[in-house]
Amino acid sequence: MSETVIEVENISKLYKLGKIGSGSLRKDLQYWWKSSVLKKEDPYFTAKEIQPTDNEYLWALKDVSFEVKEGEALGIIGSNGSGKSTLLKIISRIVQPTQGQVRGRGKISSILEVGTGFHFELTGRENIYISGYTLGMNKAEILRKFDEIVAFSGIEKFLDTPVKRYSSGMYVRLAFAVAAHLEPDILIVDEVLAVGDADFQRKCMGKMQDISGKNGRTILFVSHNMQAITNLCHNAIWLQEGVIKGQGLASDVVESYLSSVKQDKNEIRWDSEADAPGNEWVRMKSFLVQPLSDKNNAFITVRTPIQIEVEFWCYIDDCDINVNVILLTDTGECVFNMGSPSVEAEKGVLSLKSIIPGNLLNNGIYTLSLDVIRNVSTAIYEFSKFTTIEVEDVRENMSYFGKWPGIIRPEVKSYLNFK
Amino acid sequence: MVPAEKKLTWQIDAKSSYFDFNLPEIISYRHLLFRLVRKEFLVNYQQTLLGPLWILFQPLLTMVTYVFVFNKIIGVPIGGKTPPVLFYFTGIVLWNFFNDSFSATSKTFRDNIHIFSKVYFPRLIVPFASIITQFLRFLIQVAFLIVILAYFMVFKNLKFTVNAYIFAMPLVILVVAMISLSVGLIFSVITAKYRDLGNFIDILVRVLLFVTPVIYPLSAVKEHIRWIVQLNPLAPLFELFRLGLLGEGTVSPFYLLYSIIFMIFSLFTALLLFNKQSSKLIDVI
């Protein structure tokens, strides 16, 4: 059993919205007089009295408790405004909690942005030192790592050029390089991978994996990139509106988080024929797009087959009828056409079911269109771009986290070996 | 059996203490301190025509203006045998040290919030770096002052003998530095909370200049209003500074002690206030 290095106990953080502070010196003095000198109950604020529904206050975090073990990589996920960054700031000692406490052991370094302590007027060399010291490195560490940092950032030639003349890519690379060479006992990282090009992001992720995997350091990692979380972290915490909504194995937590934010079903039903889109020959009755999965609340990933069900009211007979469902990329190019067999038309409800196999689409957004065809020749109704499908990414054992190139991503068998 | 759990060594609480003064931690960040000082010098004089010479030009130009306005036009009596050039330059050099240190430290939060909100380090490092930067500038100016003094002795037959008060110089410098640091720290906390008080600081400093013996000696102030100047804890320090360097000044031990007590009191207040407030202010600014 590894030992606890951070113990977060009932942390809450209250922010007052609107005007910050009580607004005037007079009120503050009054407050101070009453609370500190007369030792009366706080006249303006007692945390207990404030209800979460109170509009003036916002609990950025509410009773958050967890433990981090030595060498653990803990991911923290949640939508914007869920309190992730506030939590990291409290553990990093930047802001104080309103209630609760954090105990820990060892030196913490936090990278909450890229380029903390950088000064635009100074050269790359100066900035490596000043940023390194700001982030908590000591002199020996910087001297030892200096060449490595320069090599990692790839700015050797511009080391003595003021940073303000750097391209933004160079700046980010240098800034991350400094941060990546920190060697604290506990590293706190907030969404810094969102910068730089795909190539650099890959390099950063690799570095992060080294830090947690090979070097066995404790990492707290916030990211919106679920791939990065599941690959880097063993455990994860899901925050929502300041409370812990889920906690456990990273892959499980990520899955329940995603299924809560993604609509698992994509469905529209038209109750009255008059309102439904269509014409004198056919009208839409309903459509439903959903993943084919055993699990509840599953969402569409690159692995899952997708089932498309469409129902029409059909008003014609005496002809053959067939339906083409067309899958398009989000830019409108046709990926493929799913043609149905022809049937003899009759008045009533016509239903279509098509299944797109799993392990075919890439992650991203696709749109669906459909055509109803009479006698295999004339399109009698087009319903273009009636819905979109969002396909989530799933990757395992992969250190690449950038967007996978291509429109489709079939499962390809490849073998690579030396003869 | 599992070995006894290693102790958790640090703790973050909802309350901050007045007495949470962690000197070893500050010392462990000394390299950051030196880099910040270095940064000040590099940033201020990069892409300038005259570079670090500005450290000398600025007081020199002020001195010329003062000599012209206060000595030639208005005719403020400076008494004694000291040439006006030396008299004003001495006052300006010490005043600049106070003024620049104070205005730099009073902006600690305002100017560094972007760093303070992203990374933790002992916040006192920043005002300490400001003071050290200003102190180095001051030393350069004092060296220049000695050059001017030597010029007057060699070419203008100025009689100058080193007196015992020269040994009080380190004390004067220390007290001026600590007063500017502590008053600056107090104002850095107050102006972070109440922004409009920032305007007040500028006026305050300007008024303070006129009740400090920079452009006149204490001896030239009429007896019945002299108490106004003597109320200013900086006044005896300026007089002592001139006494040590130029051999002319009015200093009484009582007022000097008053300055030192003021320094101790304000330093205590400043450190306590800063400790208590520095982590809370991040939410406010």
Image (cartoon, rainbow, N blue to C red):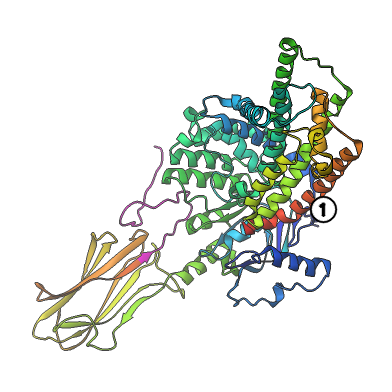
Q: Amino acid at mark 1?
A: Phe
Q: Quadrant of residue A280?
A: bottom left
Q: Quadrant of the N terminus of chain A?
A: bottom right
Q: Position of residue B236 (x, y in %)?
A: 83, 36
| Span of residues in magenta | A390-419
Residue A400 is covered by the magenta coloring: yes
Main secondary structure type of the part rendered in magenta:
loop
Q: Circle 1 sits on which residue?
A: B19
Alpha-carbon neighbours of circle 1 within 10 Å: few (<14), some, or many (≥20)? few
Between A130 and B99, the one nearer to me in the picture: B99
State the residue at coordinates (57%, 33%). B43
Q: Position of residue A190 (x, y in %)?
A: 56, 53
Give the answer, above or below, for where B6 lies relative to A43.
above
Q: Quadrant of residue A24?
A: bottom right
- Residue A364 showing in the rendered view: yes
Residue B1 is left or right of residue A276, and the answer is: right
Residue A403 is covered by the magenta coloring: yes
Give the answer, above or below, for where A33 lies relative to A105.
below
State the residue at coordinates (51%, 25%). B49
Q: Position of residue A303 (x, y in %)?
A: 39, 63
Q: Quadrant of the C terminus of chain A?
A: top left
Q: Find numbered disc 1 in the image and state the secondary structure of the residue it sits on.
A: loop
- Residue A10 showing in the rendered view: no
State the residue at coordinates (80%, 23%). B246
Between B248 and A401, the one nearer to me in the picture: B248
State the residue at coordinates (41%, 72%). A263
